[in-house]
Image (tube, coloured by chain):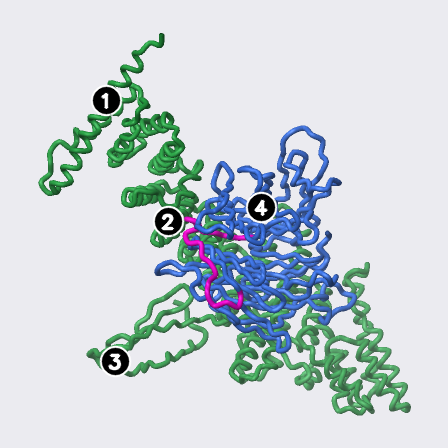
Chain colours: A green, B blue
Amino acid sequence: MEEVDVEPTTTPIPGFDSNQKHLGFVWGPGDILVYETIYKASGGSAGGCPFVHEVRKDEDIYSPILRKLFNESHHIFVGLQRIREDLPSKNKKPQFVSISKNYRSVIRACMEELQQVAVSTQDAALATQYGNQVSILLAVELIWNLCEVLFIDAAPAGSLVLHLLDWVRLHKADVDEKAREVLASESPAEHQAYWDVVISYVLQGRMDEARQVLVKQAALQPAARVMFKLLDNLLMKMPIFNPGETQTLTEFDVKWRHWREEVDHCLQDQSFASNRHLEDICKILVGDEDVLLEYKELLSTWYHFLVTRLLFSHPTVKPTELHYYAQSSMHMFLDTRSVPEPLDSILLAAFEFDIHQVIKDCSIALNNWWFVGHLTDLLDHCKLLQSHNLHFGSNLREFLLLEYASGLFTHHSLWQLAVDYFDHCPEFGRVYLELQIERVPLDTERKALKVIRICEQRQMTEQVRSICKIMAKKALRNNRLGSALSWSIRAKDAAFATLISERFLQDYCAKGTFSDLDLIDNLGPAMLLSDRLTFLGKYREFHRLYGEKRFSDAAKLLLSLMTAKIAPHSFWMTLLTDALPLLEQKEVIFSADQTHELMFCLEELTSGKSVPTPDRPMQDEDIETTKIELLRLALARNLAMAIVKEGTVEV
Amino acid sequence: MMEGINAKYVSQKISKTRWRPVSSSSLQQPDIFATGSWDNEDNKISIWSIGENGISGVDDEFEGDPQLVCEHKHNGDVLDLQFLDQDRIVTASSTGAVIIFRHHHNSQTLSVSQLWERAHHYPCDNAPCTGIVCNSPEIVTVGEDGRIILFRADQEGVLRTIENADSSTIHDVTFLRTTEILTVNSIGQLKIWDFRQQGNEPSQILSLTGDRVPLHCVDRHPNQQHIVATGGQDGMLCIWDVRQGNMPFSLMEAHSAEMWEVHFHPSNPDHLFSCSEDGSLLHWETSSNSDTPSFLQGGRNTSIVSRSAIAPAGGNQSLISSWLTGDSCKGRLETTHMLPSQTLSVNSLDVLGQCLVCGTDGEAIYVNRRVPI
C-alpha cells in the first residue's frame, strides 16, 4: 500500500471514550456507521450505549450554497458529453475552452455567494466554515484556471506568457482595490501605498495603468520631469506579443531584446539614480531577480514571481521550458525552511505538465471528488489523458466519475444528478446504477414514478419490476387494489395481477358483492395481463348482463367461462350456483347442448370430491350435497324443457 | 421568446410553482410567486419576487432575477400548492396533511394558519395528499388514499368526505362548475363528482378505450366549462369534451415521458402549456381564424407542427402527429420548446399574463416575462 502523504485527521465521536470501550464500524457508500461495542479496552465486557453514529467525510454536499455548484456543473457536464465526437479536434478546442470557462464561472459565483454569507453571518463557527470553503474554492479555481491555460488552451510560446499574466491578474485582485483607494485620496502621490500600486502594476505587466498613476507623481516633481518622461517612454514602448498580428515570434524577440537593451542602457547611465523607486522599476523591467525578490510582499506568491520573471526575462518561453523556471522560482521565493503547501506542489506539477500528478494531489487534498472528476473528464475529452488502465479495470476518468457519482447517490436529493454521471461511464456505470437505484427510498408514488422512468429509459427491466412490486405490495397492504393493479400493469407482472384478482374474488365470496367496481368495470385491455384478471373482468360482465336482464348473453358468457377454462376450478361451484337462477327461469335460457356442457362441468367437479373428508364438519357436507342435488335437479329439468322446446316444430 | 430566460439555482428540487393571483381589474403583470420543494430532508415553501426593484437596467438578463422574500419549513414533500387568495397558500403534503400558510405582507414572513394533520391517511400508514383545487373559501383535496375531501378555510373540521372515491390514486382535481369537480386517477379515468348529490358515486366516468394510462394532470378551459385537457404517463395531451361520451376530442403526442402539468392560459385560452419528466416545457398555440381553437375542432383539421426556436441539445424535435381525413387545414397548432436546453424533469409551471415560471429537478427556477401570447 502506498504511503500516506498527510496525517489522517481524527474525528472524535461524541459520548464515546476510546479508553473505555472498543469501537465497531462498518463502511457505507459515503460514510461510516460507528457504534460502541460491549468490549472493554481492558478486556471483559459491559453494557453498551444504544446509539449508532454516522460519520460523514463530505460535508460539502449538504451545504445549500455548494449544492448550486453541483447542479450547475451537472448541467455543464451533460452538455459536454453531448458534443459530437466526429468533429475534428481543432474545431473543438474553443468549445472546450468555453466549457472550462463555464465551470470556472460557476465556481466563482459560488465563491462570491459564500463570501457574502461568511461576512454577514453572526455565528462565528459558521463564518469560519464558510471562510474555509471560500479559500478551498479559490484554490480550486486557481488550479483549474492554470490547467485551462496550460492543457486545454495549450498556448504556444509567446501567448503563453500573456495567458499566464491574465491568470495571475485574475487571482490578485487587491491591486485594483488599493489603486482605487490611492487615487480617491486627496493627494494620491503622497499616499503611503502609492508606490506599492505603481510597482504592483508593473509587476503585473499593466504598463498603461502604471503610467497613469505615475503621472500624478510626475506632476508633483516638475524638476524631475525628464526622468519621468524617460521612464514613461520606456514603459510605453515595451513590446507585447500579439498573436493575431503577422509578427512572428522571432521578430518579437528581436524587438524585445532591443527594447531591453535600451532599458539596460538607461540603468547603466544612472538616469534614475536620484529616485530609488524609479530605479527599482527600471531594474524590474530588465528582470533583475534580486529586486523582484525585494518586493516579495507585493508579489505574495511564488507563481506571481514566476510569471513576472518570465515576462521580463523570457517572454518567449516555451511550454516545455516552464517547469525549469517554475522550480527555480519556487526555490528562490519560498523560505528554504518552510514545507511547500499542497497547493504549491499541485501548481508545480501543472507547470511540469504532469497531469496525473496534479489529479492525484488534488484527490488527496480535497474531500470530495467534484473537482478532480469534472476536470479529468474535461481533459479526457481534450484527449490529454493517456488511457492507462488502473488495477480495477476502468480508466482514470471513469474511476473518478464513479466515485463522485456514488458520493452523490448517498444524498437524499442529489441522487438524480448521479444518474447522468453513471450514464457516461461506459464500463461500470450501468452496474453501479443498477445497484444504487434500487436503494432509493420511495415515500411517494411520484418519486417511485421518477425512479421507474429512469430505469425504463435504460432498459433495466429487473429494477422496474422490483420497484413496481414494492409499490404494489404497499398498495395492497393498504387495501388500494386499483393502485396495486396499476403498478402490476406497469411492470407487466402477471403473477401479481393474479394475486390482486384473487383478492377481489375472495372479497366477493366473503361479502357477496364486488368492491371497487369502477376498477373492474373499466379494465380494458389490461384484463389480458393475467388469466385470473380476465376471469374477474368477464365474471363482472356476467353480473352486469344479468342485471340488465340479457339472460341469454349472460348464460353464454357463464358457460364459456367454464368451458374455456378461464375460471379457476375453485370457483366453478360458485359459477354453477350462479347458473341456478338462470336454470329456474320460466323461459328456457340454456339450450340442450349448453345444458349438457353444464352437466359435464358438474360431473367433473363432483368426481374430484367423492371421498368425504373426516375433518370437514357435517354441516358443510350437507350444504354441499344439497347444492349439488339442487343443481342436478335444475339441470335435468332444464334439459327436459330444452329438448321439448328445440324439438317443437312451429306449425 | 427565450431571451432573458435564465436558470436561478435554488438548492432545492422544486415540485410546484404558482404565481400569486393579480386582481383582474389591474393590468399588472404578476411579480410574486411561491414554490414548494420535495425530496429534501427539510422541505420548504418559499415566496419569491421578480419585482422591478431588482438590478434592472439595459441588460435584460439581470432584470427580474427572482429574489427570495421569505420561506417556511414544510413537513413532507410539497405535492401541490395553490393560492387561496392574496394572502393564503394551501399546500398538499406527502404526509397526508393539508396546510394553509399565511403570508404577512408587512413583516414579509410566512406562518402556518391552519393544519389538517392526517386529512389523507391509511389505517396505519401515511397517504400523500396529491392534489388541491381552491375556490375560496372552499378547498377540495385528493390523495393516494382515493379520498376526496372538501374543506372550508377558517373552519376546523372537514365539510365533506367522499370515502373510497377511487380504488387507485387520484392525481389531480379541478373544478368544472362551482359544485362539480373532475378528478383523474392512475388507471386513466376521469370522474365527475357532483357535490349536490349525496353518496359516494361519481356522476360520470370517462376514459380512453385502450391502455389505461395513468393520468397526472388536468386543467379546465377558462371560458368553456365542458372542455378539459389531461396529460398522463405516456406524455400524450388529450382534450376532452365532458358532455360527449367516452372519446377524447383530440389526442396529441406531446412528450416522451410523464406530463406533470398542463395549463390553459387563463386569459388567452388559445394557448396551452405543458411540462414533463423529459425536461421539456411546451407552448401550444393555435392560429386558426375560427372562433373555436383548432384543437377543439375535433382534430379533423388539425396538423401539428413543431417549431423550436432554440434547438434543445440533442433533443427530439419532431412532434408530428398525423390526423385523419383529407379536409383542408383550417387551423394550425404550433408547439414551441420554451426551455433553452435539456434539463432534468420540469415538475411544475404556471402562467399568468405574460409571465411564465417553472421549476425543475435540477434545482432551478426559470422565469420568462415575455411569453408571446
A522 relative to A407, above or below: above
A571 relative to A638, above or below: below
Residue B26 x, y percent position in the rendering = 74, 63
Q: Which residue is mark 1?
A: A637
How far apart marks 3 and 2 lie (CA) works out to 47 Å
**Residue neighbourhood size for the residue with mark 1, other residues' Cα within 10 Å, grouped as few (<14), some (14–19), many (≥20):** some
Q: Nearer the viewer, mark 1 or mark 4?
A: 1
How far apart marks 1 and 4 lie (CA) works out to 62 Å
Co-location on one chain, circles 3 and 1: yes
Q: Nearer the viewer, mark 3 or mark 1?
A: 1
Q: Which residues are magenta?
A: B153-174
The number of numbered badges drawn on the structure is 4
Residue A406 x, y percent position in the rendering = 45, 60
Residue A176 x, y percent position in the rendering = 74, 79
In this rendering, does residue A489 appear at all? Answer: yes
Subunit under mark 3:
A
Q: Which residue is mark 3?
A: A41
Q: Looking at the picture, tell me which residue is in the foreground, A53 or A608.
A: A608
Subunit under mark 4:
B
Residue type, label 2: Lys
Q: Which residue is mark 2?
A: A469
Residue type, label 3: Ala
How far apart marks 3 and 4 lie (CA) works out to 63 Å
Q: Quadrant of residue B64?
A: bottom right
